[in-house]
Amino acid sequence: MTPHLKHRRQFILGSAAAIAGASIPGLGRAQNTAVKLGVVHPMTGPVAYNGQHCRIGTLTAIEDLNARGGIKSLGGIPFQAVTGDSQGRVEVGVSEVERMHNLGVHAYVGCYNSPVTIAATQAASRYGTPFVVDVGASDLIVSRKLENVFRFSPGFGKCVDDGLLALTEINKKANGVAKTVVLVHESGELGTGTIRLLQDKLPRLGFTVLDTIAHDTPTRSFDNVALRIRGMKPDIVMHTGYVNEYMLLARTLQRYKVPAVRYSILGAGFGVKFAKESPDAAAYAMDFNHWYNPLDSRAVDLKKRIESKGFDYVFEVYCAYNAVMLLADAIERSGSLAADKIIQSLSASTWDKHFMPYGPTRFVNGQNEGAAGCGLQVINDEINVVFPDKFAQAAAVFPRPAS
C-alpha cells in the first residue's frame, strides 16, 4: 500500500468512526435516535481506489447533513454511517448487507462494482430496505424492477447512447475522419453488457468494428493486444474496463505507438489519477462518463475540500455525495424512518439540488431518468468537459494529434 493510499484509508476509517460508531453493540432498529445508513463499498481488493473515493463522498455528505442539523422533520436526528468492505466480491457484499440489517440500518448506499451491487440490492430487497445506488453501471441493477432499489447515476445503456451521440457529433465536426473501431472490454458484466450495445449501435452510425477483444480482470500484460490492434490500424480504440486494466492498456498502446483515438464509455480508469500518473498515455484520451457540472460553484468548493483531505476529485466522490443527499431529501419529506415511507418518497422524488449535469430526479423502475454523463478529454494534462456544449470547458481535439 502506497503512503498516499494508506493516508486516504486511515482518514476514511477515522472519519467513519467519528461519524458512525458503527460497530457499537446494540444499534437496534428500536433506537431511532439516528438515521443508520449502511455504506457498502470495496475498501480493499483490486478496485479499492474507487471504493475509497465512494466512501469519502458518502462520509462527507453525512458530515454536511449533520452540520446542517440532521433530519429536521424527525426532530433533527443525525445520520450514522454503518460501514462495510465488500472487497469487490459478491459474497462479501451480500454478507455485509446481512450484517448491517442485523444492526438495524434504515437504508443502504453503494456499491461501485456492478456484480456486487446486483447481489447486494437483491439481498436488501428481502427485507424491503431502501438501497440508493451511487455508482454501478449494469442495467441489470434496475431492470429487475426491485421496489427498494434506486440508482442515482446513469447506467451503461444511457451512457452508450449519449456517448455515441457525443462521438458522432465530435467526428462530424472533424469531417467524419474516424471510420473504424476496435473494441476492448473486460469479460465481466460491465464489459460484456457495454460491448453488446456498442457492437449493435456502432455500425448503424457508420463505424466499422474491426475486432472485439475481451480480457480478464486482473490482466498483467496487454502487449499482445496492443500489437494486434496496431496491425489493424483502427481510427478509434474503445475500451471498457476497470481502473488498473484501463490505465495499463493505455500505457501499452502509447508504448507501441498506436496512433488511434482512445475513446471510452464509462472508462473506469479515466480520471485524475490517470492524467497525473500517465500524462503521455492520457494526453488527448477521451471518455464519456459520470462528471460534475464544472460551472457550479458548489462542485468546485467540494473539489477543494476533497483534495485538501488527500483524495482525488473523481466521479465516485460526487456521485456518492449526491446520492446520500438525495436519500436525505427523501427521508426529510417522508418524516419517517419506515422503509415503505422512504421508498414511497424516493419514488416521487423531484430532487434538483445536486451539482451534476442532470435534470431533476425522476425515477422510472428505480432509474433516475434525469441523470446524464459528459464527454471528457485530457487536454494540457487537465480533464475538460467537451460535450455537451452547455457544460463544455474546451473544444474537443479530434483526431488525436500525432505524437
Image (tube, helix red, strand yellow):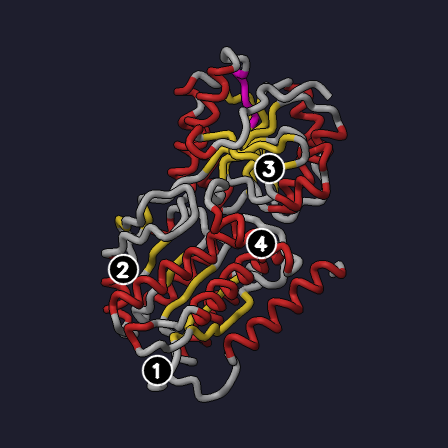
Q: Going by the image, does 14 lie left or right of 208?
A: right
The residue drawn where x is 24% and y is 68% is: 341
Q: Magenta span covers which residues? A: 178-182
> In this figure, which residue is indicated by the disc labeled 1?
32
Q: Which of marks 1 and 3 is nearer the N terminus?
A: 1
Q: Pointers 4 and 2 in contact (CB under 8 A)?
A: no
Q: Is residue 67 visible?
A: yes
**Of 198 and 171, which appears nearest the observer?**
171
Bin the neighbour count of mark 3 within 10 Å (Cα to Cα): few under 14, some 14-19, many 20 and up: many
Q: Residues within 10 Å of mark 2 (few under 14, many from 20)?
A: some
Which residue matches tag 4? 50
Q: Does the magenta stretch include residue 262?
A: no
Secondary structure category for the residue under label 1 = loop
- The kind of secondary structure the magenta stretch mainly shows is strand
* Residue 181, magenta (yes or no): yes
- Identify the amino acid type marked 4: Asn
